[in-house]
Image: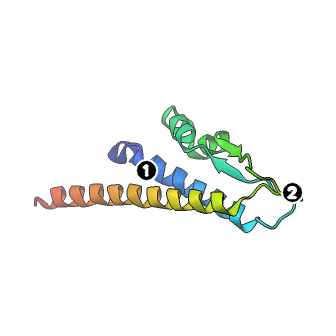
Amino acid sequence: MGSLFGIHGDALQLRSQRLGLITSNIANAGTPGYKARDIDFAAALKASQQGAGLDQAAAGATRYRVPVMPSLDGNTVEMATEQVAFAETATAYQATLTFIRGRVETLTRALKGE
């Protein structure tokens, strides 16, 4: 299956994990002491292509965000940063999904002999 979609299957799963992490950051915006995290997508994808499992690659590429202006309660979630990261990742997720969908449609047409 990996060779069928190339890196796009891994990319889709890593983007999904990144969306989950960003969502967690947003949900904890009011939690004192919460440290915002993000996945370095390029590093995680590279690790997965070098043989690491997706969960291991994502865990190894997870970093704490450095806030521009930390809050007094120690929370490092900045809503504007999280919203931009979420929008960018959601757009990239959709683009990857569209590519995979196109690949499946091409294979389906080939199997039907169209």
At label 1, which amino acid type do we have? Gly
Residue 105 point in image, percent of width and height: 25, 61
Name the quadrant containing residue 110. Answer: bottom left
Q: Can you tell which of label 2 and label 1 is closer to the viewer? A: 2
* Residue 33: mark in rendering: 2
Q: Residues within 10 Å of mark 2 (few under 14, many from 20)?
A: some
Q: Between marks 2 and 1, how big is the CA–CA gap? A: 35 Å
Are the residues tagged 2 and 1 within 8 Å (C-beta)? no
At label 2, which amino acid type do we have? Gly
- Quadrant for the C terminus in the image: bottom left
Q: Residue at x 11, y 58 (%)?
A: 113
Q: Residues within 10 Å of mark 1 (few under 14, many from 20)?
A: some
Of the pair 109 and 26, the residue shown nearer to us = 26
Left or right side of 35 for 106: left
Q: What secondary structure is found at the residue carrying circle 2?
A: loop
Q: What secondary structure is found at the residue carrying circle 1?
A: helix
Left or right side of 7 for 28: right
Q: Residue at x 63, y 42 (%)?
A: 56
| Residue placed furthest toward the top | 50
Residue 27 point in image, percent of width and height: 72, 68
| Residue placed furthest toward the left | 114
Residue 15 point in image, percent of width and height: 53, 54
Residue 65 point in image, percent of width and height: 71, 48
- Mark 1, residue position: 9
Q: Residue at x 81, y 53 (%)?
A: 70
